[in-house]
Protein backbone atom coordinates (compact mmCIF):
# COMPACT_ATOMS: atom_id res chain seq x y z
CA UNK A 1 0.00 0.00 0.00
CA UNK A 2 2.92 2.37 0.62
CA UNK A 3 6.22 2.61 -1.26
CA UNK A 4 8.91 3.50 1.29
CA UNK A 5 12.29 5.04 0.54
CA UNK A 6 15.03 6.72 2.56
CA UNK A 7 17.46 9.35 1.32
CA UNK A 8 19.36 12.53 2.14
CA UNK A 9 18.36 16.13 1.49
CA UNK A 10 20.62 17.65 -1.19
CA UNK A 11 18.79 20.87 -2.12
CA UNK A 12 15.79 23.07 -1.36
CA UNK A 13 13.16 24.30 -3.79
CA UNK A 14 10.21 26.59 -3.26
CA UNK A 15 8.71 27.25 0.15
CA UNK A 16 5.29 28.62 1.00
CA UNK A 17 3.03 28.71 4.04
CA UNK A 18 3.46 25.39 5.82
CA UNK A 19 5.35 23.53 3.07
CA UNK A 20 8.86 23.18 1.65
CA UNK A 21 10.11 21.47 -1.49
CA UNK A 22 13.23 19.33 -1.21
CA UNK A 23 15.48 17.37 -3.51
CA UNK A 24 16.38 14.05 -1.91
CA UNK A 25 19.09 11.68 -3.09
CA UNK A 26 17.65 8.16 -3.08
CA UNK A 27 20.16 5.54 -4.17
CA UNK A 28 21.78 7.99 -6.59
CA UNK A 29 18.54 9.36 -8.03
CA UNK A 30 17.23 12.87 -7.37
CA UNK A 31 13.68 12.72 -6.02
CA UNK A 32 11.38 15.74 -5.65
CA UNK A 33 9.84 15.71 -2.18
CA UNK A 34 7.59 17.84 -0.03
CA UNK A 35 7.81 18.36 3.72
CA UNK A 36 5.30 19.90 6.11
CA UNK A 37 7.61 21.32 8.81
CA UNK A 38 4.83 21.63 11.37
CA UNK A 39 4.47 17.84 11.21
CA UNK A 40 8.03 16.67 10.58
CA UNK A 41 10.26 19.50 11.78
CA UNK A 42 12.32 21.67 9.44
CA UNK A 43 14.74 19.57 7.33
CA UNK A 44 18.26 20.82 6.70
CA UNK A 45 20.82 19.88 4.07
CA UNK A 46 22.25 16.44 4.70
CA UNK A 47 19.35 15.23 6.81
CA UNK A 48 18.30 11.64 6.34
CA UNK A 49 14.57 11.58 5.59
CA UNK A 50 12.00 8.83 5.29
CA UNK A 51 9.76 9.17 2.25
CA UNK A 52 6.41 7.87 1.09
CA UNK A 53 6.96 7.60 -2.68
CA UNK A 54 3.62 6.04 -3.59
CA UNK A 55 2.39 9.02 -5.65
CA UNK A 56 5.52 9.03 -7.79
CA UNK A 57 5.42 5.27 -8.20
CA UNK A 58 1.84 5.52 -9.47
CA UNK A 59 2.47 8.60 -11.62
CA UNK A 60 -0.26 10.65 -9.94
CA UNK A 61 -0.75 14.08 -11.44
CA UNK A 62 -1.24 16.45 -8.50
CA UNK A 63 2.19 17.53 -7.39
CA UNK A 64 3.98 14.27 -8.04
CA UNK A 65 5.90 14.62 -4.81
CA UNK A 66 7.39 12.05 -2.54
CA UNK A 67 6.12 12.97 0.92
CA UNK A 68 8.50 13.39 3.85
CA UNK A 69 7.24 11.20 6.68
CA UNK A 70 9.99 11.88 9.23
CA UNK A 71 13.47 13.25 9.82
CA UNK A 72 14.40 10.30 12.04
CA UNK A 73 17.87 11.37 13.16
CA UNK A 74 16.74 14.85 14.26
CA UNK A 75 13.22 14.68 15.62
CA UNK A 76 11.46 17.96 16.39
CA UNK A 77 10.87 19.06 19.95
CA UNK A 78 7.54 18.16 21.49
CA UNK A 79 4.97 20.91 21.10
CA UNK A 80 4.40 22.84 24.32
CA UNK A 81 1.31 21.81 26.27
CA UNK A 82 -1.72 23.75 25.15
CA UNK A 83 -5.42 23.62 24.54
CA UNK A 84 -6.86 21.47 21.83
CA UNK A 85 -7.87 17.84 21.54
CA UNK A 86 -9.18 17.50 17.98
CA UNK A 87 -7.33 14.66 16.27
CA UNK A 88 -7.06 14.98 12.50
CA UNK A 89 -5.73 12.38 10.06
CA UNK A 90 -6.98 10.14 12.85
CA UNK A 91 -5.34 6.78 13.55
CA UNK A 92 -2.72 7.30 10.88
CA UNK A 93 1.00 7.51 11.70
CA UNK A 94 0.87 11.30 11.27
CA UNK A 95 -2.27 12.02 13.24
CA UNK A 96 -2.10 15.55 14.60
CA UNK A 97 -3.72 17.28 17.55
CA UNK A 98 -5.20 20.68 16.73
CA UNK A 99 -7.34 23.22 18.55
CA UNK A 100 -10.80 23.23 17.02
CA UNK A 101 -12.69 26.49 16.93
CA UNK A 102 -15.77 24.51 17.95
CA UNK A 103 -14.29 22.51 20.85
CA UNK A 104 -14.63 23.31 24.54
CA UNK A 105 -11.07 24.61 24.99
CA UNK A 106 -11.45 27.14 22.20
CA UNK A 107 -11.94 30.85 22.94
CA UNK A 108 -14.63 30.70 20.23
CA UNK A 109 -16.61 27.86 21.81
CA UNK A 110 -19.17 30.12 23.45
CA UNK A 111 -19.75 31.90 20.15
CA UNK A 112 -20.30 28.65 18.26
CA UNK A 113 -21.99 26.62 21.00
CA UNK A 114 -25.53 27.57 19.98
CA UNK A 115 -24.79 29.27 16.66
CA UNK A 116 -27.33 28.23 14.07
CA UNK A 117 -27.46 30.83 11.30
CA UNK A 118 -25.32 32.24 8.51
CA UNK A 119 -27.71 35.18 8.19
CA UNK A 120 -28.07 34.77 4.45
CA UNK A 121 -24.33 34.70 3.69
CA UNK A 122 -23.66 33.49 0.14
CA UNK A 123 -21.84 30.15 0.19
CA UNK A 124 -20.19 29.17 -3.09
CA UNK A 125 -19.70 25.45 -3.58
CA UNK A 126 -17.35 23.95 -6.17
CA UNK A 127 -16.22 20.48 -7.15
CA UNK A 128 -12.56 21.31 -7.82
CA UNK A 129 -9.99 23.27 -5.82
CA UNK A 130 -8.94 25.00 -9.04
CA UNK A 131 -12.20 26.96 -9.04
CA UNK A 132 -11.16 28.95 -5.95
CA UNK A 133 -9.02 31.69 -7.55
CA UNK A 134 -11.47 32.16 -10.42
CA UNK A 135 -14.34 32.61 -7.98
CA UNK A 136 -12.33 35.10 -5.92
CA UNK A 137 -11.25 37.04 -9.01
CA UNK A 138 -14.84 37.71 -10.03
CA UNK A 139 -16.01 38.64 -6.53
CA UNK A 140 -13.21 41.13 -5.97
CA UNK A 141 -13.48 42.61 -9.45
CA UNK A 142 -17.15 43.40 -8.82
CA UNK A 143 -16.98 44.17 -5.09
CA UNK A 144 -13.46 45.16 -3.98
CA UNK A 145 -12.92 44.67 -0.28
CA UNK A 146 -15.30 41.74 0.06
CA UNK A 147 -14.18 39.42 2.85
CA UNK A 148 -13.88 35.91 1.41
CA UNK A 149 -13.26 32.86 3.59
CA UNK A 150 -12.15 29.53 2.19
CA UNK A 151 -13.64 26.41 3.80
CA UNK A 152 -11.61 23.36 2.77
CA UNK A 153 -13.27 19.96 2.95
CA UNK A 154 -11.34 16.71 3.14
CA UNK A 155 -12.03 15.06 -0.22
CA UNK A 156 -8.63 15.93 -1.68
CA UNK A 157 -5.42 16.94 0.07
CA UNK A 158 -5.76 16.84 3.84
CA UNK A 159 -3.08 19.45 4.70
CA UNK A 160 -4.13 22.90 3.51
CA UNK A 161 -0.38 23.60 3.36
CA UNK A 162 -0.20 21.60 0.12
CA UNK A 163 -2.05 24.37 -1.73
CA UNK A 164 0.16 27.03 -3.28
CA UNK A 165 -3.09 28.59 -4.49
CA UNK A 166 -4.31 29.31 -0.96
CA UNK A 167 -0.87 30.57 0.09
CA UNK A 168 -0.77 32.95 -2.88
CA UNK A 169 -4.31 34.21 -2.34
CA UNK A 170 -3.56 34.87 1.34
CA UNK A 171 -0.35 36.71 0.49
CA UNK A 172 -2.27 38.87 -2.00
CA UNK A 173 -4.94 39.68 0.57
CA UNK A 174 -7.66 37.97 -1.45
CA UNK A 175 -8.70 35.67 1.41
CA UNK A 176 -9.72 36.82 4.87
CA UNK A 177 -8.81 33.39 6.20
CA UNK A 178 -9.31 29.66 5.87
CA UNK A 179 -11.10 26.92 7.78
CA UNK A 180 -10.16 23.26 7.47
CA UNK A 181 -12.99 20.84 8.24
CA UNK A 182 -13.36 17.11 8.80
CA UNK A 183 -9.97 15.38 8.44
CA UNK A 184 -8.41 18.37 6.66
CA UNK A 185 -5.98 20.42 8.74
CA UNK A 186 -3.76 23.48 8.62
CA UNK A 187 -6.29 26.28 8.18
CA UNK A 188 -6.39 29.47 10.19
CA UNK A 189 -9.26 27.77 12.00
CA UNK A 190 -10.04 24.07 12.44
CA UNK A 191 -13.51 22.61 12.86
CA UNK A 192 -15.14 19.20 13.05
CA UNK A 193 -17.72 19.64 10.29
CA UNK A 194 -18.56 21.77 7.26
CA UNK A 195 -21.44 23.19 9.31
CA UNK A 196 -19.24 24.59 12.07
CA UNK A 197 -16.69 25.54 9.43
CA UNK A 198 -19.24 27.78 7.73
CA UNK A 199 -20.36 29.24 11.04
CA UNK A 200 -16.73 29.94 11.95
CA UNK A 201 -16.19 31.64 8.60
CA UNK A 202 -19.15 33.92 9.25
CA UNK A 203 -18.87 34.57 12.97
CA UNK A 204 -15.10 34.43 13.59
CA UNK A 205 -13.57 35.45 10.26
CA UNK A 206 -16.47 37.84 9.57
CA UNK A 207 -16.72 36.64 6.00
CA UNK A 208 -19.13 38.22 3.55
CA UNK A 209 -18.87 35.16 1.29
CA UNK A 210 -17.55 31.65 1.96
CA UNK A 211 -16.17 29.33 -0.73
CA UNK A 212 -16.29 25.57 -0.06
CA UNK A 213 -14.16 23.18 -2.09
CA UNK A 214 -12.02 20.15 -1.44
CA UNK A 215 -8.26 20.56 -1.39
CA UNK A 216 -6.09 19.77 -4.42
CA UNK A 217 -6.27 16.20 -5.63
CA UNK A 218 -9.83 15.39 -6.68
CA UNK A 219 -10.51 11.65 -6.50
CA UNK A 220 -12.69 9.95 -9.10
CA UNK A 221 -13.37 6.42 -10.26
CA UNK A 222 -15.34 6.89 -13.46
CA UNK A 223 -18.53 5.73 -11.72
CA UNK A 224 -21.74 7.64 -11.08
CA UNK A 225 -21.18 8.00 -7.33
CA UNK A 226 -17.49 7.28 -6.75
CA UNK A 227 -15.95 10.75 -6.74
CA UNK A 228 -14.95 13.06 -3.91
CA UNK A 229 -16.83 15.98 -5.45
CA UNK A 230 -20.08 14.49 -4.14
CA UNK A 231 -19.27 16.63 -1.09
CA UNK A 232 -20.12 19.67 -3.20
CA UNK A 233 -23.81 18.77 -2.93
CA UNK A 234 -23.43 18.07 0.78
CA UNK A 235 -21.98 21.57 1.23
CA UNK A 236 -25.09 23.01 -0.44
CA UNK A 237 -27.19 21.22 2.17
CA UNK A 238 -25.05 22.51 5.03
CA UNK A 239 -25.32 26.08 3.77
CA UNK A 240 -29.05 25.73 3.23
CA UNK A 241 -29.96 24.33 6.64
CA UNK A 242 -27.88 27.08 8.30
CA UNK A 243 -29.72 29.85 6.52
CA UNK A 244 -27.02 30.64 3.99
CA UNK A 245 -27.51 31.30 0.29
CA UNK A 246 -25.92 28.43 -1.67
CA UNK A 247 -24.40 29.38 -5.03
CA UNK A 248 -23.11 26.51 -7.14
CA UNK A 249 -20.15 26.43 -9.51
CA UNK A 250 -20.95 24.17 -12.45
CA UNK A 251 -18.00 22.08 -13.56
CA UNK A 252 -17.75 22.80 -17.28
CA UNK A 253 -15.06 21.91 -19.80
CA UNK A 254 -14.56 22.37 -23.51
CA UNK A 255 -11.20 20.54 -23.53
CA UNK A 256 -11.43 17.51 -21.24
CA UNK A 257 -10.67 14.33 -23.16
CA UNK A 258 -13.20 12.40 -21.08
CA UNK A 259 -16.72 12.54 -22.48
CA UNK A 260 -18.29 12.48 -19.01
CA UNK A 261 -16.62 15.81 -18.22
CA UNK A 262 -17.12 17.62 -21.54
CA UNK A 263 -19.76 20.30 -21.48
CA UNK A 264 -21.46 20.03 -18.10
CA UNK A 265 -19.69 17.35 -16.06
CA UNK A 266 -21.58 14.41 -14.66
CA UNK A 267 -20.06 15.46 -11.30
CA UNK A 268 -22.25 18.57 -11.31
CA UNK A 269 -25.30 16.71 -12.54
CA UNK A 270 -24.98 14.19 -9.71
CA UNK A 271 -23.88 16.55 -6.92
CA UNK A 272 -26.50 19.21 -7.57
CA UNK A 273 -29.16 17.02 -9.16
CA UNK A 274 -29.14 14.14 -6.67
CA UNK A 275 -27.14 15.05 -3.54
CA UNK A 276 -28.07 18.70 -2.95
CA UNK A 277 -31.54 18.71 -1.41
CA UNK A 278 -31.56 22.42 -0.54
CA UNK A 279 -32.18 24.94 -3.27
CA UNK A 280 -29.14 26.67 -4.79
CA UNK A 281 -28.50 29.33 -7.41
CA UNK A 282 -26.43 27.73 -10.16
CA UNK A 283 -24.47 30.10 -12.41
CA UNK A 284 -24.25 29.57 -16.16
CA UNK A 285 -22.32 32.04 -18.35
CA UNK A 286 -24.57 33.83 -20.86
CA UNK A 287 -22.00 33.23 -23.60
CA UNK A 288 -23.23 32.63 -27.15
CA UNK A 289 -22.38 29.67 -29.35
CA UNK A 290 -23.14 25.96 -29.72
CA UNK A 291 -20.99 24.92 -26.78
CA UNK A 292 -22.79 27.16 -24.29
CA UNK A 293 -26.16 26.35 -25.82
CA UNK A 294 -25.41 22.68 -25.11
CA UNK A 295 -24.33 23.47 -21.52
CA UNK A 296 -27.55 25.38 -20.88
CA UNK A 297 -29.54 22.48 -22.28
CA UNK A 298 -27.71 20.04 -19.98
CA UNK A 299 -28.32 22.35 -17.01
CA UNK A 300 -32.08 22.22 -17.60
CA UNK A 301 -32.01 18.87 -15.81
CA UNK A 302 -31.19 20.78 -12.61
CA UNK A 303 -34.05 23.30 -12.78
CA UNK A 304 -36.52 21.07 -10.93
CA UNK A 305 -34.55 21.62 -7.73
CA UNK A 306 -32.41 24.71 -8.32
CA UNK A 307 -32.47 28.12 -9.94
CA UNK A 308 -30.17 28.06 -12.96
CA UNK A 309 -29.20 31.67 -13.59
CA UNK A 310 -27.49 33.05 -16.66
CA UNK A 311 -24.71 35.46 -15.73
CA UNK A 312 -23.36 38.30 -17.85
CA UNK A 313 -19.65 37.57 -18.25
CA UNK A 314 -18.48 40.95 -19.58
CA UNK A 315 -15.11 41.75 -18.01
CA UNK A 316 -14.58 38.34 -16.41
CA UNK A 317 -11.70 37.40 -18.71
CA UNK A 318 -9.87 40.51 -17.50
CA UNK A 319 -10.71 39.64 -13.90
CA UNK A 320 -9.27 36.15 -14.36
CA UNK A 321 -6.11 37.57 -15.90
CA UNK A 322 -5.60 39.65 -12.73
CA UNK A 323 -5.39 36.57 -10.48
CA UNK A 324 -2.29 36.67 -8.26
CA UNK A 325 -1.94 32.89 -8.66
CA UNK A 326 -1.83 30.72 -11.73
CA UNK A 327 -5.08 29.28 -13.04
CA UNK A 328 -4.90 25.59 -13.87
CA UNK A 329 -7.32 22.68 -13.86
CA UNK A 330 -6.16 19.19 -14.76
CA UNK A 331 -3.05 20.82 -16.22
CA UNK A 332 -5.06 23.18 -18.45
CA UNK A 333 -5.08 26.95 -18.16
CA UNK A 334 -7.58 29.49 -19.51
CA UNK A 335 -6.04 29.37 -22.97
CA UNK A 336 -6.98 25.69 -23.29
CA UNK A 337 -10.13 25.51 -21.19
CA UNK A 338 -11.58 29.00 -20.82
CA UNK A 339 -15.05 27.59 -20.19
CA UNK A 340 -14.00 25.96 -16.93
CA UNK A 341 -12.71 29.17 -15.38
CA UNK A 342 -15.48 31.33 -16.83
CA UNK A 343 -18.10 29.09 -15.20
CA UNK A 344 -16.36 29.43 -11.81
CA UNK A 345 -16.05 33.19 -12.22
CA UNK A 346 -19.73 33.43 -13.12
CA UNK A 347 -20.62 31.89 -9.75
CA UNK A 348 -18.39 34.44 -8.03
CA UNK A 349 -20.14 37.27 -9.86
CA UNK A 350 -23.56 35.86 -8.95
CA UNK A 351 -22.62 35.63 -5.27
CA UNK A 352 -21.25 39.18 -5.28
CA UNK A 353 -24.53 40.40 -6.75
CA UNK A 354 -26.45 38.71 -3.92
CA UNK A 355 -24.60 40.90 -1.42
CA UNK A 356 -26.09 43.97 -3.06
CA UNK A 357 -29.61 42.54 -3.34
Image (cartoon, rainbow, N blue to C red):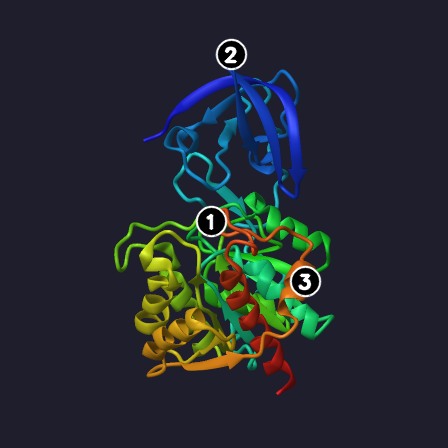
Identify the image quadrant of the C terminus.
bottom right
Secondary structure at badge 3 equals loop
Tell which tag, 1 or 2, sits nearer the viewer. Answer: 1
Report the residue at 55% width, 23% height from top: 71
| Gap in angstroms between the C-alphas marked 2 and 3 | 44 Å
Residue 220 x, y percent position in the rendering: 34, 51
Secondary structure at badge 1 equals loop
Q: Which mark is residue 176?
A: 3
Tell which tag, 3 or 1, sits nearer the viewer. Answer: 1
Residue 331 x, y percent position in the rendering: 50, 46
Determine which residue is flagged by label 2: 28
Labels 3 & 1 near each other (Cβ < 8 A):
no
| Gap in angstroms between the C-alphas marked 1 and 2 | 31 Å
| Gap in angstroms between the C-alphas marked 3 and 1 | 27 Å
For label 2, count other residues whose C-alpha is less than 10 Å away and answer few (under 14), some (14-19) or many (20+).
few
* 211 horizontally vs 278: left or right: right
In depth, the one of 178 and 107 nearer the eye is: 178
> In terms of sequence position, does the residue under pointer 1 or pointer 2 come before the other?
2
Q: Find residue 349 and report its image quarter.
A: bottom right
Determine which residue is flagged by label 1: 330
Report the residue at 53% width, 72% height from top: 123
Residue 42 x, y percent position in the rendering: 64, 29
Residue 220 shows in the view: yes
Amino acid sequence: MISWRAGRVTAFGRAWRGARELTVDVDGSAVKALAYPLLTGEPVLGDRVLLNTTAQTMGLGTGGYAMVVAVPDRLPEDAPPGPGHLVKARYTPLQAIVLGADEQDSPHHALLEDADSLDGMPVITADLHSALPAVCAAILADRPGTRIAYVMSDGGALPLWFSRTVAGLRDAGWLAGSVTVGQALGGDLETVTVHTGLLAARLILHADIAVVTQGPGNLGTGTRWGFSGVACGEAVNAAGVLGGRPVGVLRVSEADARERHRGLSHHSLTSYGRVALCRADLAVPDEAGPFWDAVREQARALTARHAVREVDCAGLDEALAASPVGLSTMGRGPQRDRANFLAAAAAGRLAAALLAA
